[in-house]
Amino acid sequence: MFSKSTILAFAASLLAANASREQIANYEPYSEVTDHNALDLDQEEMEVQLAIGNDEAFFNAQQIYIDGGHSKSVAQVRLTAPLQVNVLKGTEMLGNTPSGNQVKLLAYDDNVAGSQYMKIQYMPSESQKNYVLCRVGASLDPMTKGCLANTGVVIIDPEGDAIEIGYEYDLTKDNVNKRTIQRFSTGAKKRMYDCDDCPQNYFKQFYDYYGEFDYGNQIVMAAFDGGATNLRNFNSDFSMYKYDGREQIIKKGTAFMIVWMYIVYNLEDAVADCESKCTLQTCNDDIGAHSWDMAVAFYTGMLEGDNGQGSGKFPYALADKRCGNFNTCGENGNRVSGTSKVNLEINRNFKSGLAKFLQGDCEAVKGHKDVIINLMKIPLIQGTLRYAWKTDNEAYSEKAEAEGAIFAMSIAPMVATCNAAAGQVLEDNLQVGQNGSANFKEVKAALESVYDCLGVDPCMVGGLWDQASQSYLMDAEPPKECKGGPSAAPSNTASVGVATLAAALAFVL
């Protein structure tokens, strides 16, 4: 039983949730996405296992990929008596942990009267560090202190009749994750293709190129298993790789193919919702701002922190890593350290897009969406160029070859849509098993030939910068039109200061 004071306190906490939200890399979401933002913890734990490099660790990493461990935690319980009332998805509830602490809950889906089972989702908090205190799944380091007790009651309608529902379950086995990286790929057909108003232009390009809806999952699973893919293009046999090469295919395939496409899906879904449901007077998180916020959460991840200066695993982190290789960090895109110009521009467009969304200005939102996706292509191109150069100019490395292959696979469908011959150049030069035979000049020329079609600014791609010689690597200079431009004057100065960045953002917005 819960006291009246407990129930009233719970209701007050729900009202407080509408206050200003904790930022994600300098972006304040309009809706609750802390739980979404935590998915990069799955990626981090998976990468820790992959780095160990043995069969057991790869098995552990695969389970995390499949079953998750940190996002959308759900208790699957058996009711001690048939449900007496209908309980709709999203209904707020309150329960107790084994130690007697309160835990906030939501009905995961609709439940009709008479049901004997229920899925109950743990309600995330505003805190990035304590967003959900029950995280089990496939994690090797589970968090159980915030889980429901093995037996007890949950209450519904804390401000009204306070209906109590008895339940029982196994805390260690019946707490699962309903959001996993694998499901982003295996669920893509339903979300991005089999619908009347699917706006997923980019997903269609990838499906047309690979011939499989779960192309990302098939690539990743083949790397886990040490086998071969059976795709329409860019087929790869990973049996020739040991742990080093397979590790790179998996960790970059998950973050920069599967999660990357899911970010695009949320951006395009937000625009579609805006265009079909918004007016200049009414547009809110029920209509699509939540999808926009989710795109930010999956682009960035929790590990980047509230200011974007952390050490993440998702596309935000890749953009900052590659800018150091290509002399494209900072406000002017001419530094080799600090926040990438790509991320600074994407952040501005995330913020401006949300503001326009809430005003019901869907055409402006669509413009911001297009800019963001085009900017997201740049680190994939930079990764392809970097490892094509290494494969051509350095001693053979399984790791470098695998990185070149997976970056090329992440951009090849878009390149091939622009120019089939250019796409074939990527496959011919960056396929696994080339043993150092890639031709960097051909790869660079192929990519540069489609920059305009891709909507990519060649000067933001930059050139491969060599810190030792303080010059561009051989044959890897920025495109000719950028000579003397923003990427031609490298600087080792750290990224733009917080105050300067804030001022710049205020001016743009």
Image (tube, helix red, strand yellow):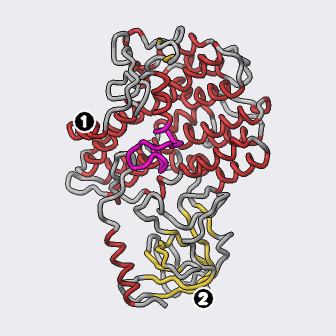
Whole-percent x and y of residue 279? 24, 53
Residue 18 sits in quarter: bottom left
Whether residue 362 sits left or right of residue 399 in the image: it is: left
Whole-percent x and y of residue 494? 38, 30
Q: The C terminus appears in which quarter of the rendering?
A: top left
Q: Residue at x 46, y 37 (%)?
A: 201
Residue 238 sits in quarter: top right
Q: Residue at x 56, y 47 (%)?
A: 188
Whole-percent x and y of residue 373? 42, 35
Q: Secondary structure at mark 1?
A: helix
Q: Residue at x 47, y 22 (%)?
A: 326
- Sequence-earlier tag: 1 or 2: 2
- Residue 81 is labelled as 2
Above or below, 28 relative to 17: above
Find out whether residue 315 is within the magenta segment. Answer: yes
Residue depth check, mark 1 versus mark 2: number of the one nearer the observer: 1
Local crowd at mark 1 within 10 Å, few (<14), some, or many (≥20)? some
- Residue 504 is labelled as 1
Could you tell me how far apart the alpha carbons at marks 1 and 2 are, in whole angstroms? 59 Å
Whole-percent x and y of residue 380? 51, 29
Q: Residue at x 52, y 79 (%)?
A: 112
Query: What residue range appears in magenta?
Result: 299-317
Q: Secondary structure at mark 2?
A: loop
* Front residue of this view, candidates 355 and 246: 246
